[in-house]
Image (tube, grey):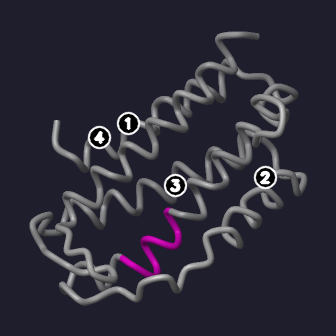
Amino acid sequence: MNVVSQFGTIIPFLEEIIQVENDRIFFSPISEGKWSSAAIVAHLYLWDQYIQNSRLPMMLTGDTLPSGQVDVQAINNDAQNFAHSGISKNNLIDRFITNRKNLLDALEKANLQTSFTIGETTLTLENYLLGMVEHDEHHMKQIKEVYEQR
């Protein structure tokens, strides 16, 4: 399975979550002091938007991306607020899936061996995506543990 396909594996996972995880569980913290599954999905959704709109165009042309200009905490706070703004579980997951599919479409057309630089680090698009896949897997594991325990 190529890295773009791996980056898409979260879609069927979340489609299953729509079916099995009730709203109360989805919007409750996964553990004391942690985000809810909803906030995790919103976090992934906002980061996908940031990547597609702000990073991917520069990555595809091999440019140098600005280092340290993204306010990670602000995006994460926005995700938490968005997740608990009254949006439904299904709407949030549907928005994520639509957005991820758009990003996957763009990546399918890309040369994954294109190199770009972030700060002092040079990466290929493939290497960057492998990191994003690991990020997805981390969060999928968190969500899966929640609904397996309840």
| Residue type for callout 2 | Ala
* Inter-mark Cα distance, 2 to 1: 22 Å
Residue occupying image coordinates x 70% and y 10%? 149
Q: Earlier in the sequence, mark 1 or mark 3?
A: 1
| Residue type for callout 1 | Thr
Element carrying mark 4: helix
Magenta highlight on residue 54: yes
Element carrying mark 1: loop
Q: Earlier in the sequence, mark 4 or mark 2?
A: 4
The mark closer to the camera, 1 or 3, is 1
Whether residue 78 is situated above or below residue 42 in the rendered picture: below
Q: Quadrant of residue 106?
A: bottom left
* Inter-mark Cα distance, 1 to 3: 14 Å
Q: Which residue is mark 1?
A: 9
Residue 127 on image: x %, y %:
21, 58
Q: Which residue is mark 4?
A: 6
* Inter-mark Cα distance, 2 to 3: 16 Å
Q: Earlier in the sequence, mark 2 or mark 1?
A: 1
Q: Are marks 2 and 1 in contact (CB under 8 Å)?
A: no
The mark closer to the camera, 3 or 4, is 4
Q: Earlier in the sequence, mark 2 or mark 3?
A: 2
Q: Are marks 1 and 4 in contact (CB under 8 Å)?
A: yes
* Inter-mark Cα distance, 3 to 4: 16 Å
Q: Which residue is mark 2?
A: 83
Quarter of the image where the N terminus is located? top left
CA neighbours of label 3 inside 10 A, class few (<14), some (14 to 19), many (20+): few
Magenta highlight on residue 90: no
Left or right, 2 with respect to 5, comes to left
Residue occupying image coordinates x 16% and y 43%? 2
